[in-house]
Image: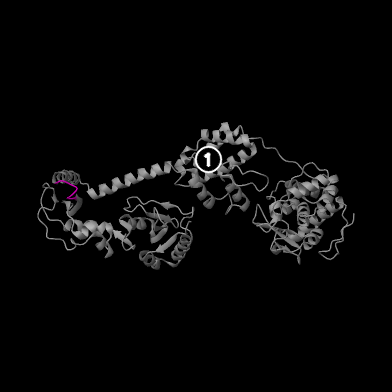
Amino acid sequence: MSFKPKVALSNDFLLQLAKLSAKVHTKVMKWAIQFQADPKSPGINYENINGARDPNLKSVRIDGDWRGIVFKPSAGDVYVLLYVDHHDDAYRWAENRKLTINPVTGAMQMLTFESITEQAPEEAHSANVGSAEGTVDASAAEAAPALFAGLEDRELMSLGVPQELLGFVRGAKSFVFEAKLNRQTIRRTIGDVKAWTIEQARVEARRLAVMLDSGQDPREVARLQQAEQEALRQQAKAQALTVGEVWPLYLENGRPKRRDAWKPRYLADLHVMVSPGGVPKKRGAGVTRPGPLYPLLALPLSGVTEDTLKVWFDREAKAGKHQAARALMMFRGFLRWCASQPEYRTLVDREAGQAPAIVQNLPATTRRTDALEAAQVAGWWSGVEQLSNQTASAYLRALLLTGARREEMAALRWADVDFRWRKLTLADKVEKSRTIPLTPYLHHLIASLPRYGEYVFASTGKTGRIVDVRSCHEKALKAAAIEHLTFHGLRRSFSLLGEAAGAPAGAIAQVMGHKPSATAEGYRPRSVDALRPFLERIEAYILDLAQVQFDSTAQPGKLRIAS
């Protein structure tokens, strides 16, 4: 059984929060609320802090300048918001701190190591074992019994002493190097007298003295070495970063060109492309196969090359060339996004998916030309009209009468239908939405539908709206003896029939939601009322071909159709 992670707030975080300006305070609070909701969200990128004493302290990006310092447990489900500040200040705060859990009291305790390293030398007895440049102090005499020497570790921890400080509280003795550098006293703890011999301490003291003679501060050298080691660890970690680790970040933070966010259908396709499969099929027996991009998830980013993609594409193309080609196009988008991110830029080859060995094997793009011929309209209309599913019947006729994309019409809500001013507002592929006239027949057709929920073309499925009417359309095509006609073919049919009806190309394009073009007639966006006579002309022409006699004065919702 998995439990929801717990998120605690430290006093330092709350005190720092109170100091922030209103603008930053709002931004930090929004981030903190999202973090509290799900600290394990794949959208949260935990960054290691170079030189930090506690590997469980992580930095989380709030924006370009502000960082949150959090405790991310290596095991367990308790996360802590510790601190928030500008990038460099937040990192400095975290470097010498460590969050521990007292094994006796269970309390969380924050240790600041600057204070620990300063206290240790003062508690040792002096015995000069160094050189003229520096000294090593060690316990050279019998020490008086320490104040807490008689208490067991568990007793000290029950009093609130952190486990890491037990030695200091008991008065543990260490070898300490002390010397002058630029008139400043440098003190470094070499190690516990129980672990180091005096000769070993002298050797270390001489090494530190040589370092001081060259003008180097041993503390700074140690910090640089630690930073270099951490950089090497981060480099090795980056080299091992897999596609599967970065893909969720791409879905959350990436977006298509000139768009604010993914379109829901395309985002769903991206998820399907990397699905592991093994789920029982909704139609037929057996289980689903893994998505085409699933095998790539295990590859390190740095391992995505022309060769690996060629091997992958050839294998996937055996199952379906067109599906493999579409998956490749999606993966190219992922590589482009990675190349735009500073943290991944050096790990990916943006051009790997465009290798000639792959491109030359892509299936040829064939332009679809399926559409209803004028003589087929009556048979198609009759077949659709006789469908037992009246919602599907109305939906298919609406596609032909408006030239709308299938998802645009399927997502139509009652709130998008203005019966008073006779207008429809559709979600648009190019723009956010477009408004077109509600023509007389379509007005009556929509008004005759029962109202089940918010969608015009309602369904009892989980989406609440019509999703897939291919089986219904195939029945209508079979009844009309039409071999093949796609949903996009209906859209193409509207355009061709609109031209035959005498409507201007610009008006047809605007109704269909085509990207504006000035090549045909000089693109001039028309108002809804300016479009109305053209769309009504197209509707009348289609109804005439379908042999439908329609009384536009009839009460909406009560169609009278005679052939």
The answer to which of 360 and 99 lies nearer the viewer is 99
Query: Which residue in the structure is indicated by mark 1?
Result: 296
Magenta stretch, residue numbers: 192-197
Residue 520 in view of the camera: no
Amino acid type for the residue under numbered disc 1: Leu
Q: Is residue 514 left or right of residue 99?
A: right
Residue 274 placement (x, y as % from top left)? 56, 45
Quadrant location, the C terminus: bottom right
Residue 490 placement (x, y as % from top left)? 76, 48
* Secondary structure found at label 1: helix
- Up-down relation of residue 283 to residue 77 (above or below): above
The answer to which of 410 and 499 lies nearer the viewer is 410
Residue at x-position 20% and y-position 56% = 120
Q: Is residue 559 left or right of residue 526?
A: right
**In which quadrant of the rendered view does residue 152 lie?**
bottom left
Residue at x-position 34% and y-position 46% = 230
